[in-house]
Amino acid sequence: MYRTLIGTLALGAALAVQPALAQKTTLNVGMASADAGKLDPHLSATTPDKALFNYMFNGLVRFKPGSMNPETIEPDIAEKWSSSEDAKTWTFNIRRGVQCHHGYGEITSADIVYSLQRAADPKRSGFSSDFKDFDKVEAVDANTIRVTLKSAVPSLLGLLTNYHGGNIVCKKAAEEMGENFQKKPVGTGPFMFSEYAPKQSVTLVAHKGYFRGAPKLEKVVYRYIPSDASRDLAYTSGEIDLLYGKGEQTWVERMGKLPNTVVEVFEPAEMAVLYLNTKMKPLDDLRVRQALGHALNIAEIVTFKGAAVARPAKSIVPIGYLGFTDDVPLLKYDPAKAKALLTEAGYPNGLTIKIIHTSLPGMLSTIEVVQQQFRKSGIILDMEIVEHATFHAEIRKDKSAIVQYQAARFPIADTYLTQFFHSSAIVGTPTAVTNFTHCNDADAEIVAARSEPDQAKQKALWKTAQQKLMTKVCALPIYENLLVWARRGNFDFGFKLEGSLNLGPVVSELAHFK
């Protein structure tokens, strides 16, 4: 009894000096990817990379955390700005005290000029076409820059948010590291790069000198788990706290029943589109492209995905974007019509189309449904499945007759029309972006709309562009899939999550475990 009492007292004394419940300070994130791509925000457009970038980088301006509403864009590295009456000259005042990661110094106008010029350079950026209307970016003084445009740009501030080419990189770090910057990125955000374990994870640590205040989390471990089942198991076993979900109704319902779990369904809806290479046989024949459209059962795909997470696409511009119209020719599901068109085009026994496709689970499950639908009309999709980063590299080499691409962009029609359908964006050209179709039929309307001051006329130009491109069947819009993630109930973003243009929840200095 004596020994037991002494042991109990000793244990009690030891516990007394320990916190009752130590607050968790490491966030473990599970992402559906086999590996990181290029961890340079000016080079990568993949969903896994973009979701990570918003932890590490700032823009001149930013979307209000938890929102993607362009009307609520707010200061970020720039503390204020102004523009000329013709909206061709913009002046930004740079916030003092913004520190680059890893001791690379304070951000000045020289870093901003360098970063925007880098983003506009097709040799160093995948988003150079976004900046084609920029005439010059210059430093007025150490804390002021001036952007001069060749012509007014719709929603210029959207290009300067912490998204794509608007992410600000630190000049000294980017120049010193060269290509190594892709694996050791340096930004100014609340978390900074610490370690990369190939095909396993990227580890970030708190940027204590962050200008909005030191993050409440000490570390973020961003794990790559391509298998849906493995990722879900890692969550249910407690290994991860924030989970990239499967954009399907059954997943939402199943995960929502787990204890201490919140399922987040939020904007933007990534629009899944089949981009058809109009210069590659057999898709150079309009009748074949029309046959594909009639062989596609969009309602069935939306049902497969689930009404809680998906809605039918109505045009090649997503629903809700400024300039969207549903007054376009949508091809209705009609397998008999599809077969008749194939016969007319010289394929009475059907045809086989070779494509390259990503192994990313959500996209792969969609194309497998499409594959089954097409087979009913005599169309065989011969698919080469590759890792997601490889997929992005291959489709930009113009190697796939059909490219299924899911994307969300700044919510105005110009971004989608310019990046996916303007001739300057055709893959394989010096100014290539993501025009996999080789269509250029709406160039005039796309260009005219950019500088049209009358919004009604601007919308009319965007409408005509969509009608022309869909009449030619350059692409087949399928559905719009809302973003789906799950998190621990005791993990708090620090804001209400309604949308994130980076396709993953923003993890900022406010994020914490309760």
Image (cartoon, rainbow, N blue to C red):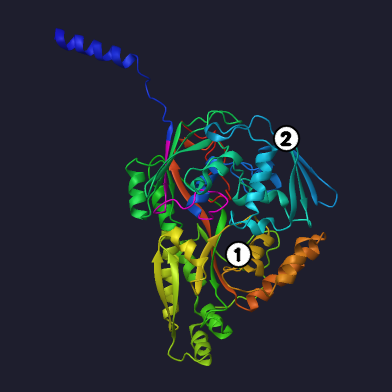
The residue shown at (61%, 56%) is 127
Left/right of residue 332 with respect to residue 29 in the rendered view: right
Disc 1 secondary structure class: loop
Q: In terms of secondary structure, what is the magenta stretch mainly?
A: loop
Task: Provide the residue span drawn in magenta.
Answer: 27-46
Three-letter code, disc 2? Asn
The residue shown at (56%, 43%) is 174
Across and down, in percent, residue 340 comes to 51, 90
Q: CA distance from mark 2 to mark 1?
A: 33 Å
Does 148 appear above or below 492?
Answer: below
Does any portion of residue 223 appear in the rendered image?
Answer: yes
Q: Residues within 10 Å of mark 1 (few under 14, many from 20)?
A: many
The residue shown at (72%, 35%) is 143
Does 335 appear above or below 510?
Answer: below
The residue shown at (31%, 17%) is 15
Q: Which residue is mark 2?
A: 143
Q: Which residue is mark 1?
A: 432
